[in-house]
Image (cartoon, coloured by chain):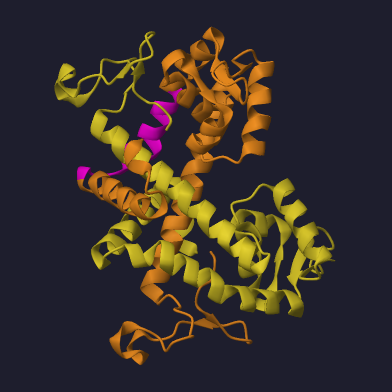
Chain colours: A orange, B yellow
Amino acid sequence: MPQLFRQYDDGMTSQLSPTSHPGGRPPAGEPRWLDAEEQKAWRAWLYSTQLLQDRLDRELTHQTGISHAYYEILVALSETPGRMMRMSELADRCLSSRSRLSHAVSRLEERGWVAREVCAEDGRGQLAVLTARGFAALEAAAPVHVEGVRTHLFDQLTPEQVAAMRDLGETLLRHLDPTAGRR
Amino acid sequence: MPQLFRQYDDGMTSQLSPTSHPGGRPPAGEPRWLDAEEQKAWRAWLYSTQLLQDRLDRELTHQTGISHAYYEILVALSETPGRMMRMSELADRCLSSRSRLSHAVSRLEERGWVAREVCAEDGRGQLAVLTARGFAALEAAAPVHVEGVRTHLFDQLTPEQVAAMRDLGETLLRHLDPTAGRR
């Protein structure tokens, strides 16, 4: 939907023709507008990712009471030794801001799924700890979530498309998050 | 990050071996857990889409004061005759809930970029109208946004990967949004 064609005042849109730029590059200082094919690829990617995220989140929340964001927090904690993690690390791991994560952890505390403790190592910083009830909630939700991911993603794709999806994701991660290899 | 392997109580995770299910399907009623390769593809997709969306939104907001969500609203309005749209259609178009869209439009009204009008056709329902100032703000932001999409997406990909991205997106849209062909 974000319009990346050149905009004209009559409300019509038109892309700069790629052939008007020998070498495929516009003159220095000129925006590198998308051509029609790039625009289609961009919009397909943008819409499909937004719709898939929304669909998975909505179905998971409806069937288990756990949003996708909460689910990610529970999973991240479940994978660590002792099922605990510094709040700052947990925010990084969940691609969340500190304030948004703190708010979410407060909601999970109210459900008895996560507890906050002072970090024993240095007496500073807070740890989030997954409780046994939180782990049980995650175990109960996992089959629902995997069924959603199967239905709305993997069941729609050929093995070649799954391979392409992974290749695309890993290519972008090398640019966007050079630490991704550690995950 | 969402863990879709089977979870064990010792905190270790392990996938069900695909070979344990002749025909590639688990027994009826058994969750269709992801195997290790599927898990990698899923995580690469999930992380890369989240990071790309966050990066584009952050840079656009920082450089222009317009979030990606606001940008999408302005673009949607700019593409219609008269640069106006019913609030309900605008919400659908922007993949937004009514309440979230209403809140965003109020913020854009405060900036003088959008005005609300009563729908003349039926006297019911509200229209959002892009103002001249709103259009100018969109025109000023577009070069920044396209540069972000170039830098963080297209510049990272080969032509074959761009084609695969479009194919993946369009395949998923046929499932997630059968009306997508009209866009």
User: For this view, does B162 lie left or right of residue B149?
Assistant: left
> Which residue in the rendered view is the most extreme toward the front?
A122
User: Residue B107: where, in percent of width, then height?
Assistant: 78, 59
Q: Is residue A116 visible?
A: yes
User: Residue B62: where, in percent of width, then height?
Assistant: 63, 62
| Quadrant holding the C terminus of chain A | top left
User: For this view, does A55 lie left or right of residue A109?
Assistant: left
Question: Start and end of the magenta stretch?
Answer: A144-159
* Residue B178 magenta: no
Looking at the rendered structure, the number of numbered marks drawn on it comes to 0
Q: Nearer the viewer, residue A90 or B120?
A: A90
Examine the residues drawn in magenta and state their main secondary structure: helix
Residue at 53% x, 52% y is B54
Q: Name above or below for residue B142 compared with residue A44.
A: below
- Residue A41: image quadrant is bottom left
* Residue A150 magenta: yes
Q: Is residue B178 visible?
A: no
Residue at 20% x, 20% y is B17
Residue at 48% x, 47% y is B50
Residue at 62% x, 37% y is A98
User: Residue B88: where, in percent of width, then height?
Assistant: 70, 55
Q: Name above or below for residue A117 compared with residue A99.
A: above
Q: Nearer the viewer, residue B136 or A106?
A: A106
User: Residue A12: where, in percent of width, then height?
Assistant: 56, 83
Q: Name above or below for residue B165 compared with residue A129.
A: below
